[in-house]
């Protein structure tokens, strides 16, 4: 019996890989523009990093981690997200000593034991950025702008940016208490998940997708009304900066995000046509995370975009570019005796940066011409016995249909001249 891939994973097949390369290139271009530098960390980390970083009472840590013990009895976890790992690397490699503001980006696979469905996988890919070192709202605005500009550059519209502030360790406990006393009487009407969240993580009740929970928390007090002066000022300035930059946003006091490290700014960008998995980007500020991981207190903010979800959105809007399969020359040897000359020509063209291919299947000329058209090839170099004897090939321009006998040494020049036209 055939062994299939694990549930929730996907192969990126040759026909689709150019779409991934297109997104990755757009990401790299925009990171260059904003001066974010790439960081690559391992796909697995010590489990403790995620327990401390993401929070023990989050869904990710409680239900979704791929945790295993290695042969040395260490508990390791496939990264469910990359912020904690970037912070770990930032500290371990003392990046804070190199510059005051570290602007980093990453692209790579993440792993969550989620229930697979369209737009939700167990291995998925994120592009993310993390800006470590600045506490001011201007960097929040830059981070959000980068996400917005990326999605715009890819051509996506119909996007909505939702914004909230989740406060800080000073004002959040006050809000938490207010929220708990509001929900106290209503707990029996909440789903079982939210009932258990009531004591441990009551703010998560606000973004529960179940209708009955949404009904119960309908008139709940809002965190924005409980922010301390510092958080409140930060939030107003951010809103002002975004307005200045012409970025449209909707305030969503229910946006709390599923990771415990967030402080102040929290945001999400949604693409509604994706239905239940409409969040294409999520992020926020995490001013306590670096200290939580044992480092010098350093503020941070970032986001991650789900690449599979972006691909789904681009597909829906018909925005994916055609794959570039065209080649310059297809070499068609007429018989196996001509293969040596064909191969020598192939090597020579490639050495001169001309995209070339030859027939490796030992087929007849008819099949070879069809194959050349499939790419399509701009030229076909037909090598027959008579031509080969004179050190020449029949070069056919596939656009004009014109054929001419050309010396092998002149082929490269002919093609390059045509490319310049
Ligand atoms: P997150 O909201 O958990 O945030 O994930 C960010 C994005 O990853 C989501 O908006 C979604 O597009 C995508 N995503 C998440 N889970 C899945 C899945 N199972 N299948 C497909 N796509 C998925 C974070 O991960 C934070 N580390 C973001 C961040 C960076 N915050 C600050 N810095």
Image: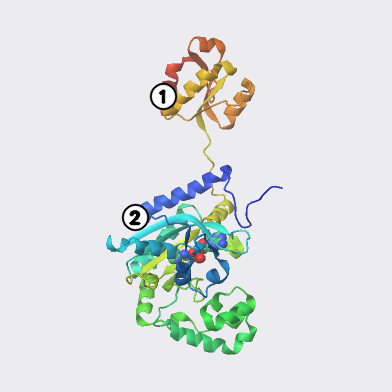
Whether disc 2's CB lies below 8 Å from ligand 1 is answered no
Disc 1 vs disc 2: which is toward the camera?
A: 2
Image position of 368 (left or right of 31): right
First in sequence: mark 1 vs mark 2? 2
Q: Disc 2 designates what residue?
A: 35
Q: In x, y percent, where is residue 279?
A: 54, 64
Depth check, front residue: 130 or 381 = 130
In the rendered image, the residue lying farthest to the front is 72
Q: Secondary structure at mark 1?
A: helix
Quarter residue 248 falls in: bottom left
Residue at the far right: name it.
1
Residue drawn at (57%, 66%) of the image: 64
* Percent position of residue 20, x then y: 51, 48
353 is higher (above) or lower (below) than 8? above
Instruction: Give the number of marks.
Output: 2
Horizontal arrangement in the rendering, residue 22 relative to residue 141 (left or right): right
Residue shown at 57%/27% (left/top)? 372
Q: Secondary structure at mark 2?
A: loop
Q: Is residue 271 visible?
A: no
Residue closest to the eye, 22 or 241: 22
Q: Which mark is residue 179?
A: none
Q: Position of residue 22 (x, y in %)?
A: 48, 47
Pointer 1 residue:
417
* Mark 1 C-beta closer than 8 Å to ligand 1: no
Residue 19 shows up from this direction: yes
* Vertical side of 280 occupied by 252: above or below: below
Relative to 271, does residue 209 appear above or below in the rendering? below
Mark 2 and mark 1 in contact (Cβ < 8 Å)?
no
Q: CA distance from mark 1 to mark 2?
A: 38 Å
Residue 351 lies, in percent from the top left, at 42, 28
* 72, 288: nearer the viewer: 72
Q: Quadrant of residue 52?
A: bottom left
């Amino acid at each position: 019996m055939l062994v299939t891939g694990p549930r929730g994973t996907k192969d990126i097949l040759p026909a689709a890989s150019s779409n991934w390369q297109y997104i990755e290139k757009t990401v790299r271009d925009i990171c260059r523009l904003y001066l974010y530098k790439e960081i690559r960390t391992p796909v697995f980390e010590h489990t403790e990093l995620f327990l401390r970083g993401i929070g023990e009472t989050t869904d990710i840590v409680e239900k979704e981690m791929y945790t295993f013990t290695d042969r040395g009895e260490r508990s390791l976890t496939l990264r469910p997200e990359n912020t904690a790992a970037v912070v770990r690397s930032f500290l371990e490699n003392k990046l804070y000593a190199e510059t005051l503001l570290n602007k980093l980006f990453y692209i790579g696979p993440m792993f969550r034991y989620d229930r697979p469905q369209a737009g939700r996988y167990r291995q998925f890919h994120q592009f993310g950025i993390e800006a470590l070192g600045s506490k001011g709202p201007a960097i929040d605005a830059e981070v959000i702008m980068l996400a917005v500009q990326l999605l715009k550059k890819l051509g996506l519209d119909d996007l909505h940016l939702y914004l909230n502030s989740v406060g800080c360790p000073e004002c959040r406990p006050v809000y938490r208490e207010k929220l708990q006393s509001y929900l106290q009487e209503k707990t029996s009407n909440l789903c079982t998940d939210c009932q258990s969240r009531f004591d441990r993580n009551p703010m998560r009740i606000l973004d529960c997708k179940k209708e009955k929970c949404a009904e119960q928390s309908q008139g709940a007090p809002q965190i924005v009304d409980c922010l301390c002066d510092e958080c409140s000022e930060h939030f107003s300035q951010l809103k002002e900066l975004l307005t200045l930059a012409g970025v449209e946003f909707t305030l969503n006091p229910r946006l709390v995000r599923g990771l415990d490290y967030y402080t102040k700014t929290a945001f999400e960008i949604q693409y509604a046509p994706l239905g239940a998995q409409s969040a294409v980007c999520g992020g926020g500020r995490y001013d306590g995370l670096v200290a939580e991981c044992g480092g010098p207190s350093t503020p941070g903010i970032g986001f991650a975009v789900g690449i599979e979800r972006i691909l789904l959105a681009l597909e829906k809007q018909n925005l994916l570019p055609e794959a570039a399969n065209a080649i310059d020359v297809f070499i068609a040897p007429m018989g196996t005796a001509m293969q040596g000359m064909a191969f020598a020509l192939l090597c020579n063209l490639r050495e001169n940066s001309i995209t070339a291919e030859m027939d490796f299947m030992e087929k007849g000329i008819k099949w070879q011409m069809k194959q050349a058209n499939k790419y399509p090839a701009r030229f076909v170099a037909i090598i027959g016995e008579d031509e080969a004897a004179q050190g020449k090939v029949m070069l056919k321009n596939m656009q004009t249909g014109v054929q001419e006998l050309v010396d092998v040494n002149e082929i490269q020049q002919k093609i390059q001249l045509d490319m310049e036209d």
